[in-house]
Amino acid sequence: MSSLESPQPEPTNRGSWDDVRELPPSAKLVAKVLEYNDTMTQQQIAEETLLPARTVRYALNRLDEEHVIDSRFSFSDARKRLYSLDIES
């Protein structure tokens, strides 16, 4: 027997705009801001949206639960995280 079966693609845990539709307005706003700005810190998102830092944190957590954002540590300042939108096209 030969093993010429094609490997199955790994399922992606990426969200879609449908996942964002049921989220609170603050999360929708943060998603839209991230759509127009590639990568931002939490502080930059708060400044751009005029939302309090606590609300931005909540929105980012909700977006993360839906797998629609990607976060990574900043190389310039490891205390900060960089957020970007990760939605299937």
Image: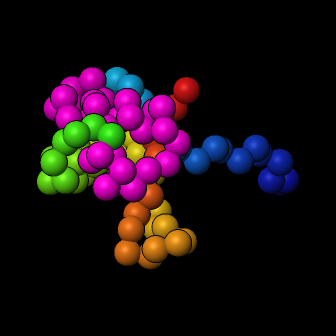
- Identify the magenta region: 20-47
Q: Residue at x 37, y 75 (%)?
A: 79
Whether residue 26 is visible, yes or no, is: yes
Residue 2, horizontal then vertical, whole percent = 85, 53
| Horizontal side, residue 26 vs residue 79: left or right | left
**36 inside magenta stretch:** yes
Residue 57, horizontal then vertical, whole percent = 22, 53
Q: Residue at x 27, y 23 (%)?
A: 21
| Horizontal side, residue 69 vs residue 59: left or right | right
Residue 61, horizontal then vertical, whole percent = 25, 51
13 or 20, nearer to the observer: 20
Q: Main secondary structure of the magenta part?
A: helix
User: Would you identify the image quadrant in which residue 18 lies?
Assistant: top left
Whether residue 86 is visible, yes or no, is: no
Farthest residue to the bottom: give it. Answer: 78
Q: Count the marks.
A: 0
**34 inside magenta stretch:** yes
> Which corner quadrant holds the N terminus?
bottom right
User: Would you identify the image quadrant in which residue 89 lies?
Assistant: top right
The answer to whether residue 63 is above or below residue 41 is above
The answer to whether residue 82 is above or below residue 39 is below
Q: How is the image coloured?
A: rainbow
Q: Residue at x 65, y 44 (%)?
A: 8
The answer to whether residue 2 is above or below residue 37 is below
Q: Residue at x 83, y 48 (%)?
A: 4
56 or 1, nearer to the observer: 56
